[in-house]
Image (spheres, rainbow, N blue to C red):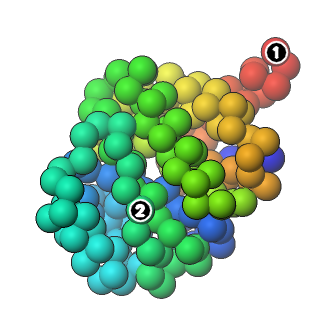
Amino acid sequence: MIKIAKQDITEVETDIIVNAANSYLMHKGGVALAIAKKAGPIIDEQSRKIIEQHGKLKVTEVAVTSAGNLKAKWVIHAVGPRGTKPELLEKTLTNVFEKAIELNARKIAIPPISCGIFGFDKKLGAKILIKVAKKYEKHFDEILIVSIDEEIITYLKKEQKMQQSN
């Protein structure tokens, strides 16, 4: 089941929270900062280790850390594209869902990756996110798409209705 909610992703009780991350897993702004603050120092510590061991992440790549003080088991950090690059966003989202399946997650909370400070077109981002979520819906009990941005929530809900009627 795909749900869309205007809420703080750091308050969601779920198996996985997805973080819209940068290539260096430096959680300094947007969703990443909110998640890192709420989780406590564990995410920053584990993120530093990932970068030390593997180098910076490329666009579309994901990494996993524990969730610290969040109401989740893990955080999947996903590096989405800067600007509107549809094929890269689709690949990023696919990698997120594939990693969640690997982790045997049943519930996942995901923000509209790249549609905030990375500048991806919100309407197109909503369309891609709903399309990819629908493709993976059967693998999860719940896919919760979460944002505090009213504009993107509106696009997501419209897109979900359009894709349900097709």
Identify which residue is drawn at 42% across, 20% down.
Answer: 87
| Callout 1 secondary element | loop
Q: Residues within 10 Å of mark 1 (few under 14, many from 20)?
A: few
Q: Can you name the residue that lies furthest to the right here?
A: 165
Q: Is residue 112 visible?
A: no
Q: Is residue 64 above or below residue 78?
A: below
| Callout 2 secondary element | strand
Q: In the image, which disc is placed on residue 64?
A: 2
Q: Is residue 37 above or below residue 51?
A: below
Amino acid of disc 2: Val
Q: Is residue 77 left or right of residue 162?
A: left
Q: Can you name the residue that lies furthest to the top here?
A: 166
Identify which residue is drawn at 51% across, 78% down.
Answer: 70
Is the residue under label 1 in contact with that under label 2 (CB below 8 Å)? no
Pick the residue in front: 134 or 46: 46
Pick the residue in front: 57 or 84: 57
Which residue has dot 1 on it? 166
Amino acid of disc 1: Asn
Relative image position of residue 92 (x, y in whole percent):
43, 37
> Within the image, what quadrant is residue 127 found in?
top right
Identify which residue is drawn at 24% across, 47% down.
Answer: 57
Q: Is residue 59 left or right of residue 86?
A: left
